[in-house]
Amino acid sequence: METIERDYTPEGVQFFYLYKQLAHPELDHYVDPYTLEERLMHVEQAERQLGSRIPWIADAMTNELKHALGDMPNSEFIIDPDGRILERRAWSDPTALREDLERLIGPVENPTRVSDLDLPSEPPVATVVKGIVPRVTPPGRMMTLKVEPDLDSTQLPFYTKLRADVDREFLRNGEGKLLLGFHIDPLYHMHWNNLAPPLTYEVTAPDGVGITPTSATFAEIEEPADADPREFLVDISTDDPAASFDLSVTYYACDDDNTFCIPVTQSYAVSLQVDPDAGRVFGAGRGGGRFAGRGGRGGPGAMIERIRGWDANDDGLVARSEVPEQMLDRFDRMDENGDGVLEADEIESLPARMGPGAGRGGRGMRGDPIARLRSFDANGDGRITREEIPAQAGGMFDRVDANGDDVITADELDAMAGRMPGRPGR
Amino acid sequence: MLQPRTTSLLALAFSLGLATTAAAQPGGADGRGRLIRNFEASAPAVGELMPNLAVYDRDGQESRLPALLNSRFAVLILGCLT
């Protein structure tokens, strides 16, 4: 998309990304915003992460525009100067888009290549260590209920956000399981201070809605701090599908800079209706996968989650057309059997296949430049040539390639690792 | 705990009430095909005008989508952080 923008903005074409609700909540620990201000924080983070020149605009919090445009997570539209649709595509496809613009506007003389780009992209927001508190295994596939935060109940942001999921038994028969998950919003840079009293929730349900237990306090955690969700799997029953219940939660909001740690009580109204805009959580209802809950943001699980997140059409496969442009040059190495799509086993084996540093430790491949460089060693000979790396890693390559011979050796990698503060050598 | 008779009556209510909306979430039983069919049926068709709805720039300034497009060719791509 970025190369197309470079080529067709000078031809008078405008490009916009439209930010709407999350397609895959919890991926990179992001959770859906509650207010427009929070959605705009997401936009700023998307700008930083993608490093794109394409401006973002945001949908209203009711997701009106997404609904009006066919409710797809990653659709694209070409619009003429009269505001009429010239092309529409359910899934964004840069190759097809370029062909469309060549036909509509005309071909460009020297098309920009991905290797010409130098996108100043940043990794996702870091959190304190995750994987301390085991995730609750739901009884099966869960569906998310509509949750309405009571924004008037507090002057403070909702530093943690509730996701309320029910199982299919409840949807079929009115009796089943409810998973209450309280997720730290990473954009506020908070953590659970486990030296403070743990989170407590309390439900107030109308007649005809049964939730057991109606209140609970999360377990004491030995680690002094973590950022794992606080989850409660409870029983739920109702004879009124249109009912809702109130929930209040009390927790200590503690920022990562240790400037405040205060008790917060916030309230929600939870409808028993499924929320069609809630997105799909990877791993929910299917055991979480091999790496679930391990290694924090940068662990192998995070790497796998991120790649699964490219599966825009939710078919369980990651096709080349779904891979972010800046990662396309690595697609062939990821696609072990060369069939043009990443199957589940290929994705699961990526941390092992993509180099010894990939996904290891708390910083992860994207956050750890040395591990990231190692992962570019396509032929596994322990040396990284300039041809093996994407253009945007060129600056790092130059810093590590001490003798300037366009080859990074294991010794040069070790030397750089030793120079990085707080990072042990190999 | 609900009584059995009540529960059986509820099954119909839920099939009409809650369970039908369950299919609206991504990754449902029909997955990709359902999403595509919904898009083809509900998105504005080629030749139709883009909807006149509100959008917000990074500073929170509201504008209407057609006004933003500014009488030029435009490409609009939906996306998010995940």
Image: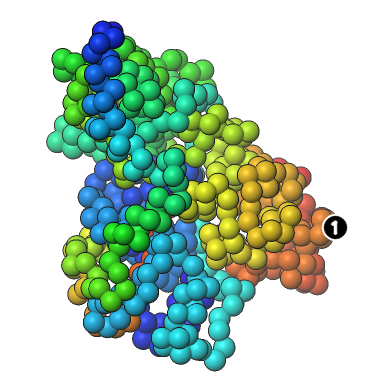
Instruction: Classify A141 as above or below A219.
Output: below
Q: Is residue B6 left or right of residue A109?
A: left
Of A92 and A414, the residue lying toward us: A92
**Is residue A402 positioned above or below A368 on the image?**
below
Residue appearing at x 53%, y 73% in the figure: A95
Q: Which residue is depicted at the point 32% across and 21% down?
A: A173
**Label 1 is found on which chain of the structure?**
A
At label 1, counting other C-alpha atoms closer than 10 Å, the crowd grade (few under 14, some 14-19, many 20 or more) is few
| Residue at screen point 36% across, 40% down | B23
- For the residue pair A424 and A333, the one nearer the viewer reads as A333
Residue A275 picture location, percent across and down? 29, 39
Determine which residue is flagged by label 1.
A381
* Count of picture labels: 1
Specify the quadrant of the image occupied by residue B16: top left
**Which of A104/A118 is in front?**
A104
The image position of residue B15, as x and y in percent, is 29, 30
SS assignment at label 1:
loop
Which coloring applies here? Answer: rainbow
Residue farthest to the right, as pictured: A381
Q: Is residue A343 visible?
A: yes
| Residue A411 in picture, x, y percent from top left | 82, 55
Residue type indicated by callout 1: Asp
Which image quarter: residue A5? bottom left
Q: A202 or A373, which is in the foreground?
A: A202
